Amino acid sequence: MIENRKPSLLKKFLESLGLVLVLNLLVKPFWIFGIDRTVQNVVGPEEYGMYFALFNFSLILNILLDLGLTNYNNRNISQHQFLLSKHFSNIVVLKFLLAVGYFIVTLAVAAVLDYNFTELRILLLLAFNQFLLSFILYLRSNLAGLHLFKTDSLVSVLDRILMIAICSILLWGNIADTPFRIEWFIYAQTIGYSLTALIVFVLVWLNTDSFRMHFDMTFSRVILRKSLPYALLILLMAFYYRVDTVMLNRMLPDGNVQSGIYAQGFRVLDAASMFAFLFAGLLLPIFSHMIKRRERIDEMVRLSVMLLLVPVILISVTSYFYRYELMNLMYHHQVEFSAPVFGVLILALIPISSSYIFGTLLTANGSLKYLNIMALSGMVVNVSLNLILIPKYQAYGSAIASIFTQAVVALIQIVLSYKLFNLRLNVRLILKFTVFIGFVVLAATFINDLPIMWAFQAVVLLVVGIIFSLSIRLFTVKGLIRILKYKKE
């Protein structure tokens, strides 16, 4: 009976994986470039910069709303579905208690940073949105645990679809006599998250035998103790990845403007990182399985590096060479300042993607102690560099701090992985990547002088880079098929 069930579950999982990829590729890029970018162009860099800094501040402390409960619940319900009613009743209460703690900490830190009344009001709205988002993620973990993968896939983009609909009406529906305000953008998110949370709550509730609000101190203590190392890691990583705009906002007289400039450069990086994140999601169960069976992982690491870093290098170098054109295409304000910031940030995609590979490997191995030390080091480096560079170089200095931090973090993860897993140094692969990067940079320099439109130049560069990577066998379609086959097995 077990053998008959596994293929069915695998088929459901693979179908839902394909569905969630398609939905995310359709919805989230439109949200980022169609809605979020338009809002910044409409309200201007200063007003959006204030929002972006406060949003990142609320996001840094987001882990206090969860403390690893969602991951624990996903794993536990998958293994013991009959426990859904008991855990659902307990964890819902615990989530609300954690929300109280999150709001207290948020207000305390906001008081230390001396936010004014307007900033504090927006921060509280954003904090409430973070609570709703965290609650949705917890509710979705129950759907995944029940193997309702397609339902979970649809729910994963429901909030964005609702927000896109609301913001589209507000931006282009001509229903208001006054100009679009950043508060409307936040209210749209609140409505989208609220409706989604209500719908998912009903879906989970329909799958429970009973639901009664109940709090068990012993149960909560056990869960939180197991989850704290993971929660600390998420907090530290969020800190060094998101603290830049918060520091820009508080350290400079024109902090809102500088945060807005940084946001323009950061937006493409954030969107591009989504692909690396999805790739890491594919790798995690593979690495976990191989480690459990004590298999050599050298070949899988090599394939992962080739498959992810080749397109990432191409995208990063191409975006760097056409940074001014891309920023001018996307934005109406401060392009001359945001283009250099974007040029530095998009190159950070290379170490970020490396971290998604080797960080996933360390996570699969349960090396949370090493990962927390790494994340703490990254936080210290990032804050120190921002304190030095922001006063003189403003948003550009923060971008330099970001790429340096990401490079340090990636290097630490690579060194740890090689030591812990006794990986063999692949000199041939390193030489291939060196030749590939050199070729792409030289090709970009040459193609940049061709008498054709810059967009065609960028396409030519991408095509030439792909062909060259295939010719030196740095990127292979067979490699991707091998990873997918291994996951299926």
Image (tube, rainbow, N blue to C red):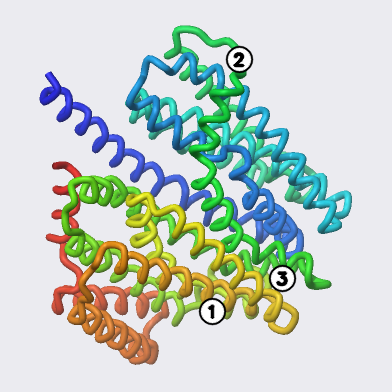
- Amino acid bearing label 2: His
Give the residue drawn at x 30%, y 64%: 308
Q: Is residue 273 visible?
A: yes
The answer to whether residue 88 is left or right of residue 315 is: right
Mark 1 or 2: the one toward you: 2
- Amino acid bearing label 3: Gln
Q: What residue does disc 2 label?
A: 214
Q: Is residue 279 above or below residue 211?
A: below
Mark 2 and mark 3: span between their CA atoms? 47 Å
What x and y, as percent, mark residue 193?
60, 34
Give the residue drawn at x 20%, y 32%: 11
Q: Is residue 377 above or below residue 447?
A: above
The answer to whether residue 48 is left or right of residue 83 is: right
Q: What residue does disc 1 label?
A: 324
Q: Which of these two is toward me, 254 or 187?
A: 254
Mark 1 and mark 3: span between their CA atoms? 17 Å
Instruction: Write down the quadrant of residue 245 in the picture.
Output: bottom right
Mark 1 or 3: the one toward you: 3
Q: Is residue 180 visible?
A: no
Tell me the SS state at disc 2: loop
Give the residue drawn at x 51%, y 31%: 223
Q: Which of these two is toward me, 103 or 55?
A: 103
**Reading the chain from its start, which is encountered first: label 1 or label 2?**
2
- Amino acid bearing label 1: Tyr
Q: Please tell me the numbered disc located at residue 182.
A: none
Structural crowding at the residue carrying mark 1, measured as other residues with C-alpha within 10 Å and reported as few (<14), some (14–19) or many (≥20): some
The answer to whether residue 114 is left or right of residue 345 is: right
User: Which quadrant of the figure contains the N terminus?
Assistant: top left
